[in-house]
Amino acid sequence: MKRYFLLCFCFVALTTNAQKKINFETVFFEDAIYDSPTIKVNITGALCEFDVIKSKVKVYNYGNKTLVVKPEECFYTTYQGNIFSRDKWIVIAPRDNEAKVIDIKADNIKTDTTTLHLNGMYICNSEETYSAPAMALPPEKEVKIGNFRLELDGWDRDGKEMMIRYKVKYVGDKIGICSPSKVTLKSKEGNEYKNQKEKDKIHIFKKNEDLIVGFLYDSDSKKENTMNWNDAFGESIPEKTDNISIPLKMDLIKTKDKN
């Protein structure tokens, strides 16, 4: 009988320790940082309530290759087990940064401590570029380059200056990469002009994403100009890289102040 009561006591003690009673409607966590030579992750605005845990995740890419975070492979630890996110991919171009709120939802997950496991970290180590024939101006209304679809958004010529805009959409299943600075204009005389628009910008696409991309040239030739797409369009397969775990603990002062 004594053994029975001892076992019951241990079970109650373990259950009590497993999930603390928290007397705040909303728990606010301290900001946290993960920093390395190639990547930095800032966690801000983290909080939890009875049925949600969320935080703003800002990723800085210090390297020269595209990074991808797949939130569906990321999770927060809770007393109900590890619960995974359902948010959309975060794609971070080289030497750039992106921010997104990553959250989870379930009943009875309020806690004063958790860990965000960024297990969905990927890197685009290699890129396959697409070739396409040069396009004589005036520009075509629709252009297909590999898994990219370009729809003319407008074009204009004022003296030597020539401006062309395309709505670019990626329809592949990998990661689309567009480098507008690589698209050149070539005159009948053989002179080649660099794109003066978005010189240092690299556009990164997830499936079915689109945006307006501009091309601006100063050309002395008034006729028979052609656009050379070169290797400005390509795609890459994200490869799994190291997991990142970031502990979060309650900011007691902030939590008391806001409840």
Image (cartoon, rainbow, N blue to C red):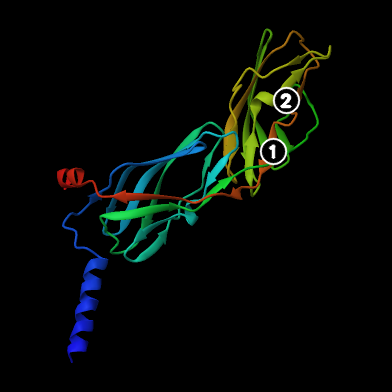
Q: Earlier in the sequence, mark 2 or mark 1?
A: 2
SS at badge 1: strand
Element carrying mark 2: loop
Tag 2: amino acid: Pro
Q: How far across and how far down the image is residue 21, in percent?
A: 19, 62
**Which residue is rendered at x = 30% and y = 61% of the image?**
109
Task: Point out the residue furthest to the front here.
Answer: 2
Q: Which residue is mark 1?
A: 234
Q: Nearer the viewer, mark 2 or mark 1?
A: 1
Residue at (43% x, 53% y) in the render: 117
Residue 77, image x and y in percent? 37, 59
Q: Nearer the viewer, residue 234 or 36?
A: 36
Q: Is residue 178 above or below residue 207?
A: above
Q: Residue furthest right?
A: 189
Q: Amino acid at mark 1?
A: Gly
Residue for badge 2: 139
Place of residue 161 in the rendered image (x, y in percent of width and height, measured from the top left): 66, 11
